[in-house]
Amino acid sequence: MPEWLIIVVRVILFLVALFLLTRLLGKKQLSELSFFEYVSGITIGSIASEVIINTDNKVWHGIIGICVLSLLIYLVEFISVHSKKFRDFVEGSGTVIIKDGKILEENLKKEKYTTDELLQLLRGKDIFDLSEVEYAVLEAKGSLSVLPKKDFRPPLTRKDIGLDSVNEKETQSVIMDGEILDEALTAIGKNRRWLQTELAKKNVMLENVFLGQVNSYGALTVDLFDDKIQVPEDQERPLILAHLKKCQADLELFALATDSKKAKSLYINNVKKLENSIQKLTPFLKINFCTARDPNNYV
């Protein structure tokens, strides 16, 4: 067999072997590398390249070496999961770089980082002024986690201003490339008849749908193959909220118009009950006006 063909065969063989071993080791190997993962990755690559290029070496020796190293990596990760001390030794631990708005120079020198590199990492977090930072940690894998001072944190949340909110469930894709995904429909407790009804409401044919998704509120949104076709947005929930508010306003008018104390008391009590219901239902029924053009986004 020609030498070039031997190299080709070895490349394919090691590519398959490395792929299978990486799948066995898990997705962690694809994330940012720790110290041990960095060293082990270089070692595996060196063994593979040496055996591929040097045809005097036996293929099986290289595969055995890679398998042994992969087994060692697996054992190290297994022990790391069960021992924090061992995990900190192998993978390292986070180092506080900024505390109470002040740079800890000793920790910065310990991690071999310069001031320019720290500022670069901060700019990567959209922070250009050091005075905006309350706390910052240099993680074991080289990324910087930053806690800005309260005055410089992102815009107010619903909780900050006392508004109720709801936890959203995962959005399910029920149509892809014009094909219905029955497994996704079953996961949200829906069926094909429901889906066909929702498509009919939107005046859309199944074969014209590139992607269809059902959000946590049970609303179907679709993206069509033809982007020029406009699909009407879901207005069912906002209309329900509008009707509830109209009923509340009507009851208030009735309370003002009647001279009967008993009737007036009845209307007022029902206004309060309806107001309480509206407050509880608003997070489910109201569209976020900032993202109202996108039917996928609700609060």
Image (spheres, grey):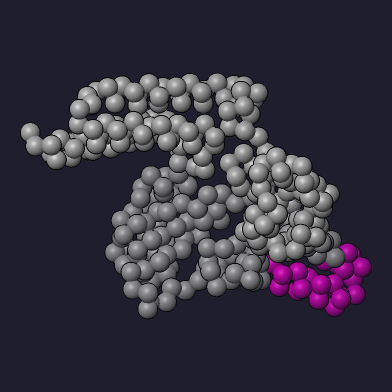
Q: Of residues 186 and 130, which is closer to you in this image?
A: 130
Residue 281 image position (x, y, % from top left): 69, 58
Residue at image location 43% in from the left, 73% down from the top: 231
In the figure, is residue 290 to the left or right of 224?
A: right
The region drawn magenta spans 243-267
Quarter of image, res 141:
top right
Magenta-colored stretch includes residue 236: no
- Where's the N terminus, which quadrant? top left
Residue 187 image position (x, y, % from top left): 45, 44
- Where's the C terminus, which quadrant? bottom right
Residue at image location 88% in from the left, 64% down from the top: 265
Label the magenta part by its dominant secondary structure: helix
In the figure, is residue 173 to the left or right of 235?
A: left
Residue 5 image position (x, y, % from top left): 13, 39
Q: Residue furthest left?
A: 1
Q: Of residues 177 and 122, which is closer to you in this image?
A: 122
In the depicted structure, whether residue 289 falls above or below residue 113: below
Taking the image as drawn, is residue 272 in sight? yes
